[in-house]
Image: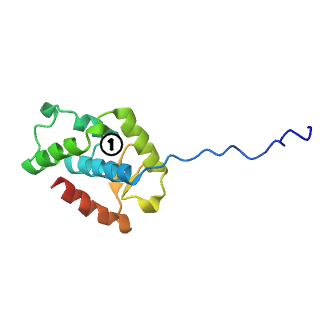
Amino acid sequence: MTHTQRPYSNTPAYTPRPSLSTRQLVDLELGLFLLQQLHPTAPPTALPALLRPDDARWPSLSAKQKKYLNRGRLLLAHFTNSLHWQALLDAYAAAPAHRLAYDLSSDGSHFSEKTVGFSRNRLGVLRKMLA
């Protein structure tokens, strides 16, 4: 090595974790809340299909659920792209747990509302956004 070369580092290159803006976090949690209200057993990846305008797939919704779905479609239309939604779910799963209102399973097959933490209070706000 000459004096103009940099020494090799044994430390791995820094790879930033995906992060979410506040807007993305609220939109994502609104999407999870909507999915929880309309189809509680569905995986979090089911939201884009729910937001697509095909009412034949959802015939047994109550009047309140239909209202939630219509408002959700207006507010979350940008989540009809499955790849975009999956990228945000991955970033959500990588975010610090204390900032989140939902727990996602490691394999992405299910999600649940947190039972403790200050983030639970956001669920009331999400409910009011769709009401």
In this rendering, would 77 be left or right of 105?
left
In the rendered view of the protein, which quadrant contains the C terminus?
Answer: bottom left
Q: Amino acid at mark 1?
A: Pro
Residue 74 in the figure: left or right of residue 113: left
Q: Nearer the viewer, residue 126 or 78?
A: 78
Q: Is residue 116 visible?
A: no
Figure quadrant of residue 102? bottom left
At mark 1, the secondary structure is loop
Can the viewer see residue 71? yes
Q: Position of residue 31 (x, y in %)?
A: 29, 47
Which residue is situated farthest in the left direction here?
63
> In the visual, does 9 lie left or right of 128?
right
Q: Is residue 38 left or right of residue 107?
A: left
The quadrant holding residue 39 is top left
Q: Which residue is mark 1?
A: 43
Q: Position of residue 96 (x, y in %)?
A: 48, 57
Q: Quadrant of the N terminus?
A: top right
Count of numbered badges drawn on the protein? 1
Residue visible at 35% across and 33% down?
82
* Image coordinates for residue 15, horizontal then vertical, percent: 61, 44
Examine the image and state in which quarter residue 74 appears: top left
Say above or below: 45 vs 96: above
**Residue 4 placement (x, y as % from top left):** 87, 39
Query: Which residue is most to the front?
Result: 4
